[in-house]
Image (cartoon, rainbow, N blue to C red):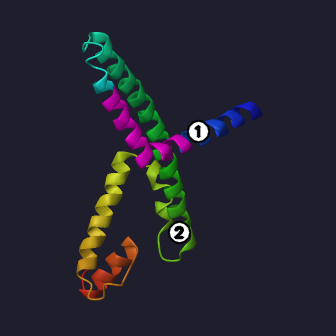
Amino acid sequence: MKTQTNQNHIFENVAQEATHFTGTTIAFTLAVTVIIVWILTGPFFNFSDTWQLVINTSTTIITFLMVFLIQRMQNKDSRAIHLKLNELIASLKGPSNRLIDVEDLTEEELETLSNYYRFLAELAKKEKDLSVSHSIEEAVDLHKEKYNEK
């Protein structure tokens, strides 16, 4: 178990460093340099199929690995953002705790929530004070009260 955790930690560090490096000017310059060198070696290899295969295979492998690397880091970043938002929701008096872990809902449940918030936005448009914020229930009750609706 400890070996597994250690391996995960090592891979996470490597993934993070690789992700940060690939987003730098140095990495881009290195990639452009590799392409220029490949192009310049074309006449030396008579622009052969093997010469073309080298760049095609190399870029395919790098792209394949980068997809997983980027997705891994994106998942980590998304989870961190969700946790931060959950902390904000949970710590504030006004917002509804129903939205904590909302990312675990189904697409249909998210659509239902989205419709509620569209409705809330429509009610908010009728407010004269832009700083007023309510839960859906409070907004509906306040709207009914204001406009004498039942």
Q: Quadrant of residue 70?
A: top left
Instruction: Single out the residue that lies furthest toward the right.
Output: 2
Instruction: Give the camera-side residue of 44 and 52.
Output: 44
Image height check: is 26 above or below 59?
A: below
Asked if marks 1 and 2 touch (Cβ < 8 Å), the reply is no
Image height check: is 129 above or below 24?
A: below
Q: Disc 2 marks which amino acid?
A: Leu
Q: Which residue is mark 2?
A: 88
Instruction: Single out the residue that lies furthest toward the front.
Output: 44
Instruction: Give the camera-side residue of 102 and 140.
Output: 102
> Percent from the top left, x then y, of residue 34?
37, 31
Identify the disc placed on residue 14.
1
Taking the image as drawn, is residue 130 in sight?
A: yes
On the picture, is 105 further left or further right than 11?
left
> Percent from the top left, x then y, of residue 135?
40, 73
Instruction: Give the camera-side residue of 94 and 78.
Output: 78
- Residue at the spot x=61%, y=36% of the render? 11
> Percent from the top left, x then y, of residue 63?
38, 30
